[in-house]
Amino acid sequence: MFTHNLGYPRIGIKRDLKKIVESYWKGGIDKSQLMAPREALNILNRTK
């Protein structure tokens, strides 16, 4: 029997992306502040 993991959400070690998105939804940050950490997490995840 083979099993596969098609992926997992790459939200950061301490759910960083989740907290950033929730802050954006509440109006605490604007779109540019939302995108910068997201790009940094994407780069970090690609290097793992």
Image (cartoon, grey):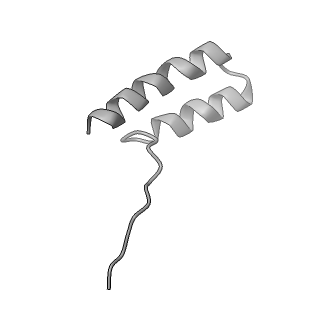
Residue name at image x 47 percent, y 49 percent: 9
Please identify the quadrant where the N terminus is shown. Answer: bottom left
Image position of 30 with respect to 4: above or below: above
- Give the residue furthest to the bottom: 1
Give the residue furthest to the front.
2
Up the image or down, 28 lies above or below 1; here it is above
Residue 14 point in image, percent of width and height: 40, 41
Q: Residue at x 41, y 23 (%)?
A: 40
Image quadrant in which you'd find residue 48: top left
The x, y position of residue 36, in whole percent, is 50, 17
Relative to 3, 26 lies left or right: right
Asked if 32 appears above or below 6 in the picture, the reply is above
Percent x, y of residue 24: 67, 27
Instruction: Judge left or right: residue 40 versus residue 27.
Output: left
Residue at screen point 38% across, 69% down? 4
| Spot occupied by residue 7 in the image (x, y as percentages of width and height) | 43, 55
Q: Name the residue nearer the viewer: 19 or 41.
A: 41
Residue shown at the point (50%, 27%) measured from the top left:
38
